[in-house]
Amino acid sequence: MSTIDLALTNLDELFPGDFTQEQIAKGKTIFLKELSLATHKFYGGKMVTMPKAGIYGFNWFNVYYTPGVSKISTTIRDNNDASFDISNRGNLVAVVSDSTRVLGDGDCTPPGGLGVMEGKAYLMKYLGGVDGVALCVDSYNKKGEHDPDKIIEFVKMLQPSFGAVNLEDISQPNCYKVLDTLREECDIPVWHDDAQGTGSVTLAGLINALRIVEKDIDKVKIVFLGAGASNTTISRLILQAGADPHKMILFDSSGSLHKNREDIKADTRFYRKWELCEKTNPDCIDGIENAIKGADVLIALSKPGPNTVKPEWIKSMGTKPIVFACANPVPEIYPYAAKEAGAYIVATGRGDFPNQVNNSLGFPGILKGSLLVRARKVTDEMAIAAAYSVANFAEKKGISPSYIMPTMDETEVFATEAADVAQTAIKNGVARLELDWQSAFDRTLRDIKEARAIMDLLMKENFVKKPDSSILENALKVAIETVK
């Protein structure tokens, strides 16, 4: 195993023993950022376009291009759905963003989201056997404002080339209009991973966390810190899964959501937030310190920490409290601090801590399942089915306070999820094709294994070169010097 492989296996061991837990946690974040920048420079990005049809001599260009390809054009002309079979459309996703809310870094300008969108395409291929194309768009109008209608028009124009669209990193309130409009007006699935994806995987983690502490979803008190696209959709899916809205309280930067929030009611762009104002927190409880007393669950997707969530809040929660601190790249409170404050189960969005509640466990399988049956949309029922699929997969393996979610190396979770989503799409009446569960599972697992075999071959033959260990050493040096 190389120096880089060893280092990334256990990041904590990179730092000397005299470092505090807080220094190590900060250092890991800095190290990963520096290593990311260096490796992206080394590779020139993460994705490349390669043919998947064989070249057996130059005369084959007459088959793949003119004159033979004319038959492909006329066949699709006469039956547009044929494009899913005789082009790559049936396994191709557009990853679309205006880069206005990139992770915890905010508006990064249109090209600033390319690293994340390429990363999304990378994970789609390796985890789900799905091809993805990163498309960062300029959504500015003539007034210099980000215009959701420009994104809507862009996606409508590109849909003939893709089997699905993954929206990403679009700030609120534009994200609500973009998703809700495109879900209804497009003939292919349009999925907002920051909203539906985060909602699905968070619900999966919550299902298993509640199983461990032996509490029912309809009886627990849940506090949500942050009321952006992620948490508003998380709360909506949790409600559909059976939670009691009277036991739910959401907070945005101005306070709790409730029926007296005239500022939200007055701005019709925030209609999703207003729906939650009307449904949740009937007693209009305000102040996070008041709301969190006796709470069973805290779900935070707000400002990156590490001190956004206070230890004293957790100390005031009920028995065996569950804390999801899922801001990226730094959780609202580090897991060790949450545990010290009394949290029984802690989850974050990062893979270097236990219980990673991250979209990467959701979107590859959900999109694959949607593509397999040529779904016209991703319904909320499909997202909830994915949540139970992920949760049940982990439960069968044996859940614990430090294992409420499968990990990304458990390959079959994605095939299981794809099959469950495909069946739900058929039940919801949004599928163009009928496909049985086993066939969907087998097809997904085959495509994942094929994608990984190709990657392994490219690495073995040195077409994909391994970065020199000096890249890691330089990144670690910066991290250690910064946190000393």
Image (tube, rainbow, N blue to C red):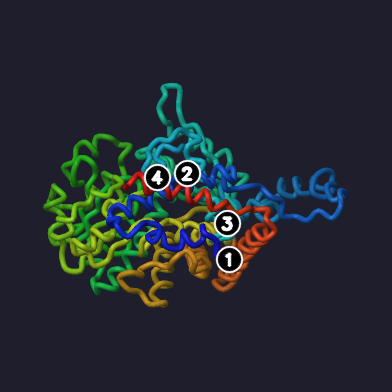
Figure check: 307 above or below 142: below
Q: Position of residue 26 (x, y in %)?
A: 33, 50
Q: Amino acid at mark 4?
A: Leu
Q: Mark 3 and mark 4: span between their CA atoms?
A: 21 Å
How far apart are the two marked residues, 1 and 4, measured between alpha carbons?
Answer: 29 Å
Q: Amino acid under label 1?
A: Thr
Residue type at mark 3? Lys
Which structural element holds mark 3?
helix
Q: Residues within 10 Å of mark 1 (few under 14, many from 20)?
A: many
Is residue 1 depicted above or below 47 in this figure?
below
Q: CA distance from mark 1 to mark 3?
A: 11 Å
Q: Nearer the viewer, mark 4 or mark 2?
A: 4
Q: Nearer the viewer, residue 236 or 36?
A: 36
Q: Which residue is mark 2?
A: 182
Residue drawn at point x = 64 percent, y = 58 percent:
459
Asked whether 121 or 184 is in front, the reply is 121
**Residue under circle 4?**
103
Label whose residue precedes the other's in the sequence (3 or 4) = 4
Q: At numbered mark 4, what does the secondary structure look like: helix, strand or loop?
A: loop
Tell me if mark 4 has few (under 14), some (14-19) or many (20+) residues whose alpha carbon lies within 10 angstroms of its own: some
Which residue was labeled with disc 1?
444
Q: Residues within 10 Å of mark 2 (few under 14, many from 20)?
A: many
Camera-side mark, 2 or 1: 1
Question: Whole-Å distance between the Cαs marked 2 and 3?
Answer: 24 Å
The mark found on residue 363 in the picture is none
CB-based contact (under 8 Å), mark 1 and mark 3? no
